[in-house]
Image (cartoon, rainbow, N blue to C red):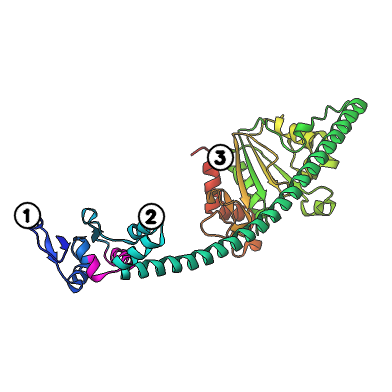
Amino acid sequence: MMYLASLTEEMSDKVQGYYFLKTLEEMDRVVADTKKRNSILIRRDFAKEYFTPSGLTRYVNNARRINRNLTIESDERSDVLTVERFIRKLSDIRSTEEALSLMTAYPKEFIDVVKFLADGYSVGKEELLAASNKVSRLQAIIDEKNVQLSDLRHSVMVEQENKMIVQSKLSALVNRINYQYNADVDESKMFSVDKNSYDKIIYIKEITRVQFVDSFVFYLKEIMKVLYSMPVRLTIIEGYYANGKVKLYPDLVPHYKLRERDVLSGDILMLGMQPKLMEDILRNPSSVSILIVLDRGGYFSPHIKGENVEYFYTVSDLKDINPSVPKSRIISYDSETLFIPLIEGFGDLDEGERIARYSSTEIVKRIVTLVEGR
């Protein structure tokens, strides 16, 4: 409904369909009615009777906060004396006589707007002081960040120089080895190899230790030998200089004790990534179909790359690995990932029973499915 706040009723307003509000109480009731979409137009005579300029501004602002369905505004044609209009009148004063004349004509409005301006000056001064303090704090933070940025730039410059020096030393060392021993060392392949001749490589990278991985890898190899009626190779990578780990792998030959037949078809233990040996293994001279790699070397990324490589990661806690890695590629203790179950009485079983128990586990079934491309 459309309401007109006015002390007089004119025929033209009735024709336009306005409902008249003649008292402040009547207008308060319309403002409080939040269930209907109403509009109120305030005429000058009503505003002058019940409000000062600043009081009218506060009332309109508060009414809009209380009732979001209400449209309330002053009638521009009737020249309602708002704060803005009265301030413009004050700014047009050019003499003391004009000021006295305005004060005489609008005594209540004059005092009200002067108090409004004085209060606004105090509030503005406090806000300006608070803003100045905030700017000072922000400037101190900016100065601190600039110092940190300068330190970081210096650190980056130092690391770039160190990287260049290390690269130069590495290139010089590789060139000297190749020249003196005719070794054909390729520094771009010292930590990763991207070519292989296998049908499928199962690459298990150990991020953090998980129980039963050793027995799982051993029996996975045996299951695939039985399943496909062909040999399966196994390579385990431990950390550099980890000589104490050799006795933990009695069925594997360490890289420094290899014979020709070991390189061609044997199961090998590497103490650190051995690029030349890894290239020879990946050439697959014995035409084996499947290679299993257990990487415990601690390098941040896998050493073998290729489209036919199926990657799995062992973590004792899911926080140890990037969340983007699919849970179907994680071996952990979480039921939503792949996990190696505890087989009761495992030590009392013979080899055939152990293979049978492992072959029935969900993790083995999923890996076999991936190997077969299903």
Residue type at mark 2: give it: Asp
Cβ atoms at labels 3 and 1 below 8 Å apart:
no
Does residue 169 sit above or below 252 in this rendering?
above
Label 1, secondary structure: give it. Answer: helix
**Image side of residue 323 versus residue 144, left or right:** left
Question: Is residue 57 found inside the magenta-colored segment of the image?
Answer: yes
Q: Which residues are magenta?
A: 47-67
Q: Earlier in the sequence, mark 1 or mark 2?
A: 1
Q: Residue 371 bears which disc, if any? A: 3
Q: Mark 2: few, some, or many residues within 10 Å (few <14, many ≥20)?
A: few
Residue type at mark 3: give it: Val
Would you identify the image quadrant in which residue 8 lies?
bottom left
Residue type at mark 1: give it: Val
Spatial separation of the CA atoms under disc 3 and disc 1: 86 Å
Which mark's residue is nearer the viewer, 2 or 3?
2
Cβ atoms at labels 1 and 2 below 8 Å apart:
no
Q: Earlier in the sequence, mark 2 or mark 3?
A: 2
Residue denoted by label 2: 92
Residue denoted by label 1: 15
Would you identify the image quadrant in which residue 347 lies?
bottom right
